[in-house]
Amino acid sequence: MFGQASELAQGIGNYGERTWGREYELRRSELQRFWQFLARGRRWRLLARLLRRPVDLRTLEGAAGNGRSHYAGIQNVPLAAITGSEDREHDFDAAFHPRKAGMVDRWVSVAMARQRGVALPPVQLIRVGETYYVRDGHHRISVARALGQDSIEAEVIAWI
C-alpha cells in the first residue's frame, strides 16, 4: 500500500520537475531573445539615424481624419503596416524593438505565452488610410516581430 503511494508521489514529483525544467528553459530562451532584440534595436536605430530614416513610431496626434470612425472587425494585418502608436511611442521604436530594459518581464511573459501556444487576444489597432496605430498590444506586436511573423490578428477601428 505504501509502495503505491510512494510511486505516485514520485511520479508527481518527476512531472513537476519536468514541467519546471521546461518552463525554466523556455524563460531562459525568451530572456535571451529579449536581450538580443533590445540590442538589435539599438543597432537598428543607430543605422537608421546614420541613413536619416525615421526611428520613432508615428503618433496618432498628427494623423489625418475628420473624427468619425467605424468598427472594421477582426483582420489579419501585416506587421509592416503598423507604424504608429496611440500613446506608447516612447517605449518602442518604429520597428517595435523595445527601448527600455525595464520592459523585460512583460515582454518575456508575452513571448512565453506565444511559445506555449496560448491564444492571446487580438491587438487593437486604429487605421488611418493605410497606416495602423496601436491602441493595445505593443508587446504582442514586438514579440511577433522578434519571432519573425509577417502579420498579426487585430481588432481594427477605421478613422474616416
Image (cartoon, helix red, strand yellow):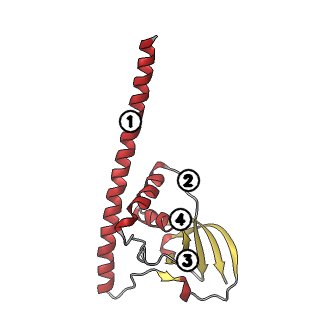
Q: CA distance from mark 3 to mark 4?
A: 12 Å
Residue 125: image quadrant is: bottom right
Q: CA distance from mark 3 to mark 1?
A: 42 Å
**Amino acid type, mark 1:** Arg
Mark 4 highlights which residue?
152
Q: CA distance from mark 2 to mark 3?
A: 22 Å
**Amino acid type, mark 3:** Tyr
Task: Identify the image quadrant of the C terminus.
Answer: bottom right
Residue 146 position in % (x across, y down): 40, 64
Q: CA distance from mark 1 to mark 4?
A: 32 Å
Badge number at residue 18: 1
Q: Is residue 118 left or right of residue 71?
A: left
Which circle's residue, 2 or 3, is located before the other in the chain? 2
CB atoms at circles 2 and 3 under 8 Å apart? no
Q: Which residue is depicted at the point 60% across and 78% down?
A: 127
Residue 95: image quadrant is: bottom left
Mark 3 highlights which residue?
132
Residue 71 position in % (x across, y down): 69, 73
Look at the numbered disc 1 and give the secondary structure of its residue. Answer: helix
